[in-house]
Amino acid sequence: MTADRRQAPVPYHTGAFPPQGLLWESLIPQIGPAAAAVARYDGMLAAVPNPGVLLSPLTTQEAVLSSAIEGTQATMGEVLEFEAGQEASSPERREDIQEVLNYRSAMREAERLLVTLPISQRVLRAAHKALLAGVRGQSKAPGEYRRTPNWIGPPQCLVDEARFVPISAEQLPDGMSAWEKYAHSDAEDLLVQLAILHAEFEALHPFLDGNGRLGRMLVPLFLWQRGMIRQPMFYISAFFEARRDLYYEKLLAVSRDDDWTGWCGFFLTAVQTQAEDNLKKTQGILTLYERMKRELPELTRSQYAVRALDWIFERPIFKGSSFVSGAGIPAPTARRFLKLLRDESILQDLSPASGRRAAVLAFPALLNIAEGREVL
Ligand SMILES: Nc1ncnc2c1ncn2[C@@H]1O[C@H](COP(=O)(O)OP(=O)(O)O)[C@@H](O)[C@H]1O
Ligand SMILES: [Mg+2]
């Protein structure tokens, strides 16, 4: 018997969902602070005049980080430059960027459906279809459950080298029905219910690909639908991305050791940490917006100052020419604004104009808040 003998793959925990033996006494001390942090963040959301616009960099950043957990390399800067009309640096990177853009479309599709529907298999399948649209996802049956086994382990591994083998394709429909029934139930606590829903969704692994991303989208969607937050905006993935191995290990321990309590504790820590981080970033963005709303009219002496501000907040990386033609500001005024904002270092050149290529500009203050560090 050698120490490096491979462990047999852990199979799906048949019969152990929903969990019966949660150790509430160990979770309760975490539930209060996590729920309070979410409530404080929600209070901040109430103060944001147009969250769809002001928080859009955070939404993009979430799509980037959730996609990065399983290896997508594109950065937020690359995604925003691509949206501004720049070519991707390689075909591979172009596909990564498409996955990130799909992530945002999938969220929007789910949000649209959840206005009238509960969180359900139908909504998940519709979101999956949007998530896997396009070249890379096409072979992965967008919008359809798998009809074959799948397994989780090192890239390209064989099934007996896997760490975890999800529920069989035959049992999957029943597994998803049980998941949906639990999603609609009135469980003891919403955050614990959400923790369990995420882990169970990952253990079922209903799709050929995209299960991790969909399971993480569930976090803002569920919090929103159950009234814990007033907008479908909650950014969970930074926590898991920074602790990927531990995240996978905690999920594995659910099936291997029936350790639902350990998973729920980890998830509650993630929710609390991210609620605090989301609050800080939202506060930072709002403060920046309000300050610029005071300063820009003075600087430009123009009635168009706030229109320019809103346009730039929605697109913190953009082509100068798009601003001139698309911001709804008379062109000479728009050009004067760009020069002023550059001179004041509010905007920065990412790539200068050359020949027929328009200059690409960035708004560093906003990007740095979204990234949580100095990127520009
Ligand atoms: N042992 C495990 N048990 C259950 N789920 C796991 C385990 N390890 C990893 N996962 C989940 O599987 C996801 C990867 O599945 P995949 O379908 O490739 O999703 P995506 O393509 O969205 O990253 C991880 O992000 C994680 O959520
Ligand atoms: Mg994947």
Image (cartoon, grey):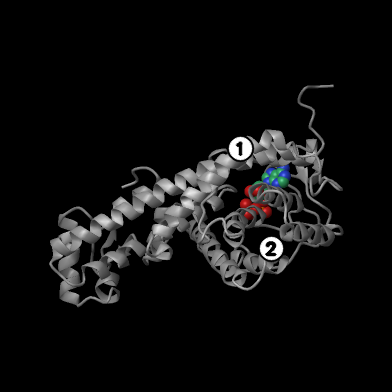
**SS type, badge 1:** helix
Q: CA distance from mark 1 to mark 2?
A: 38 Å
Q: Nearer the viewer, residue 281 or 14?
A: 281
Picture coordinates of residue 359 (x, y %)?
A: 26, 63
Residue plotted at (68% across, 67% down): 125
Q: Quadrant of residue 136?
A: bottom right
Quadrant location of residue 356? bottom left
Residue type, label 2: Lys
The disc placed on residue 4 is none
Above or below residue 35? Residue 312 is below
Residue that label 2 marks: 140
Residue 190 is situated, as x and y percent measured from the top left of the image, at 65, 51
Q: Which residue is mark 1?
A: 30
Of residues 221 and 21, the one nearer the viewer is: 21
Relative side of 125 to 277, left or right: right
Say if 140 sits above or below 61 in the image.
below
Q: Position of residue 150 (x, y in %)?
A: 77, 53
Q: Residue at x 62, y 66 (%)?
A: 127
